[in-house]
Image (cartoon, rainbow, N blue to C red):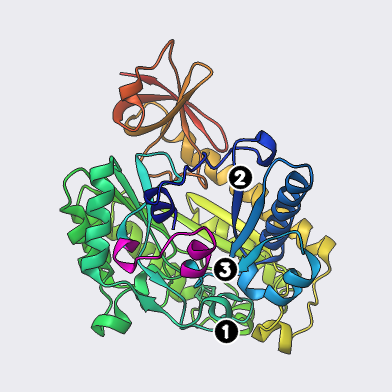
Amino acid sequence: MLYQIAASGIGICPEETPFDAGVADVVILNTCGFIADAKQESVEAIMRAVKAKLDGFIKRIYVFGCLSGRYHKELVAEIPEVDGFFGPDDRAALLSALGVKYSPLLDIRRHLTTPPHYAYLKVSEGCDRSCAYCAIPGIRGRHVSVDMDSLVAEATALAAQGVRELIVIAQDTTYYGLDLYRRRMIAPLLERLSQISGIEWIRLHYSYPEGFPDDLLDVMAGCDKICKYIDIPLQHCDGKVLGMMRRPSDENQMRALIEKFRTRVSGVALRTTMIVGHPGEGEREFKRLLKFVEDMRFERLGAFTYSEEEGTYGALNYKDSVPQRVKQERYARLMELQGGISLDYNLSRVGSVQRVIVDSFEDGNLFCRTQKESPEVDGQVIVPVKAAPAQLIGNFVNVKITGADYYDMSAELI
Ligand code: SF4
């Protein structure tokens, strides 16, 4: 959408431009309607835009995305200051509101909101699974893959724009291809992406444990351009909780899968996500989760507290039985445990030489990442320098790791 807006001659401000900066006529908000925290963040952003409009800084507000689609009727009734609400499939209608004619042929062209050297590449939309807590299949529908040739064309255009790192995303990246090609095609896709000139790193997020394709591990182990990084949200390990989550894995299978990752892809960094406070999780089940995390020593782990989402199987069939205070307390205990594991992992890298990509330069520091850190969600490698030539940003340098804390590492240029 942004590419087509820009191609029509409309100027686009940097994403971080405050609504009351007085430089834009129109604000477009892309919203998330997935969980309570995301919904709240989206509504707060809408209300900040409304204030800027009422104060005369902007003329029009358009709200787009999942929250807007999911709660369309309620939002129209409750926030009349917004000029239009559009669901995630309403791109043509939003462009039309701006006086731009939508062209499907331009769908593969991108105007980036990330720094110019990395970009997210969405390979499919929707999900065929039915996890009890999850609203995504209801919001985004069944899984639909983008055909491989279109993705390669999109990635080639991104590389020509200066993108060096592709971050491959979907609700479940390992499911890619099952609808279009009748088999899992994520490994062949990554192989084709790795042949694009200019692309140096390809990173994979959001893979689902059940049916994890073995050929993906071969490609990851054998191709230097594929980051040795697997993001596999497991959500829990306890059999009873997983059953109530309607996720078919069990703890033994998960332990075996993680061992396989580490055996087959030497030095791989694993990232996972857990939900605490799901219905069915008592203190015993939670302690089992802690023990699992302690044993598995994930290099990275994020957690959510369970929030009941209307329309989901969980909301219709379970009582949200764990009190909020207990959810928060379990979250803190889990993250404290993970803090020590992350610290140990970072400390184990002190003294090593790492190839890093330079994301930015601020206040005398280069902010970089190795292939084991994804932007936004993982830590950074911070390198103090007197000055940074502009050509350093978005490029690769070698550094020696000199220090580590729970999250970030410090390093020196070599
Ligand atoms: S696999 Fe992921 S997106 Fe699909 S229902 Fe489960 S949690 Fe939601």
Q: Amino acid at mark 3?
A: Gln
How busy is the neighbourhood of tag 3: few (under 14 within 10 Å), some, or many (20 plus)? many
How busy is the neighbourhood of tag 1: few (under 14 within 10 Å), some, or many (20 plus)? some
Q: Answer with mark 2 or mark 3, whichever residue precedes in sequence.
A: 2
Q: Quadrant of the N terminus?
A: bottom left
Across and down, in percent, residue 292 comes to 56, 63
Q: Amino acid at mark 2?
A: Asp
Across and down, in percent, residue 224 comes to 21, 47
Write the residue at 80% across / 68% down: 78
Foreground pick, 306 / 199: 199
Q: What residue does disc 1 label?
A: 246
State whether residue 154 appears in this view.
yes
Write the residue at 61% across / 80% down: 245
Question: Label 1, label 3: how many angstroms apart (C-alpha)?
Answer: 11 Å
Write the residue at 65% across / 82% down: 312
Question: Label 1, label 2: how many angstroms apart (C-alpha)?
Answer: 46 Å
- By secondary structure, the bulk of the magenta-drawn segment is best described as helix
Q: Which residues are magenta?
A: 92-107
**Callout 2: SS:** loop
Q: Is residue 281 above or below residue 407?
A: below
